[in-house]
Image (cartoon, rainbow, N blue to C red):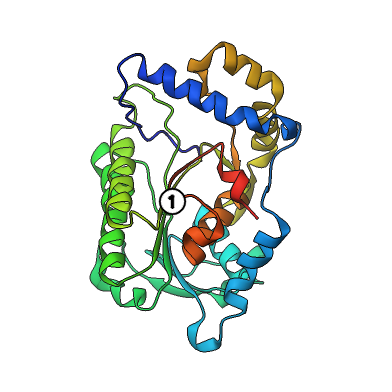
Amino acid sequence: VIFIPLRTYCRTRTHPRTTMASRIVSSVRSLLPRASQVISSTKSAQEVAGVRGFAASASPGNQAKVVVFGGNGYVGSYVCKSLLSMGVAVTSINRSGQITYPEWDHWWHKVNWVKGDALEPEEWKDKLAGATGVVSCVGAFGSNAYMEKVCGDATVSMVEAAKAAKVKNFVFISAHDYQLPSFVLSGYVAGKKKAEEAVASHFPTSGFSLRPGFIHGTRYVNGVPVFLSTIGGPLETALRGENAMNLLESQPKLATIMVPPTKVEDVASVAAQAAATGAGAGIPVGPISAWDIPKYAM
């Protein structure tokens, strides 16, 4: 359940990792006034109303449509729910098709479930017609070759198909870069990097790559709920607190590993907004760090 790093390359002449870490510490210092609690949203009421009213104000003939790959998974299911709350028409494409749990009864039937392999565009590319946005929530662990294929090549195929279908926005659920040794899950890291590059290349003004660390919330494993927030919630609060900020200021190199967990609802909210409304939601195009994701959540 922990997203492992995507290596970020910093072009600088002296101590690139220290410089990057210092920038992180500087940017998160602005959060201190609210660091005593987990930040769930900093969007204004008008911004929230505007985003939620985006699809609601559309006529049945031009309702916003978003395609979610991996919509029956942990993060993907929350993305689907967030989109539905905005009044967006949702199609989910995943290898296993529809999977339901009792807790999903109030929303699963509102999603158009499509069985398809992300690596086989012929199975689903017609579903992208008329879509406003696409969200990639796919990923897996295994051999390095397998991880690079699923975490990278699969999203690259989505990006290319979305571009060809003239989809406006593309959102990729990537991962924070912990800058671990290169031999640790190298296929996973290479795959995420490849996918991010594809998003930036094909959607330079409407592509978003979210980089959360540990994503906490309620995750279902074979129908059994696992309450990840039992650990993630307190840890997020602690790592956004003033004591943690003081430590990072004195030891900036720790900024790459002392990253606060992120609520799955926050990740889903930002992904849904970006896919449905693009930069119009006030969300910056490009990579969005684990520190910044909660700022844009509704």
The image shows residue 75 at horizontal and vertical percentages of: 52, 53
Is residue 121 visible in this depiction of the protein? yes
- Pinpoint residue 154: horizontal percent, then vertical percent: 29, 55
Is disc 1 surrounded by few (<14), some (14 to 19) or many (20+) residues within 10 Å? Answer: some
Q: Tell whether 207 sits left or right of 85.
A: left
| Residue at the outermost top position | 250
Residue 132 quadrant: bottom left
- 285 up-or-down from 235: above or below: below
- Left or right, 112 with respect to 198, comes to right
Whether residue 72 appears in this view of the structure is no
Q: Residue at x 33, y 38 (%)?
A: 188
- On the image, the x and y values in percent for residue 88 come to 55, 73
Q: On the rendered structure, is 145 left or right of 81?
A: left
Q: Amino acid at mark 1?
A: Val
Compared to residue 22, the image places residue 50 above or below, namely: below
Rendered view: 171 above or below 248: below
Residue 151 image position (x, y, % from top left): 33, 47
Q: Residue at x 29, y 72 (%)?
A: 165
Q: Residue at x 51, y 16 (%)?
A: 252
Location of the C terminus (image quadrant): bottom right
**Which residue matches tag 1?**
285
Q: Is residue 253 above or below residue 67?
A: above
Kind of element beneath mark 1:
loop
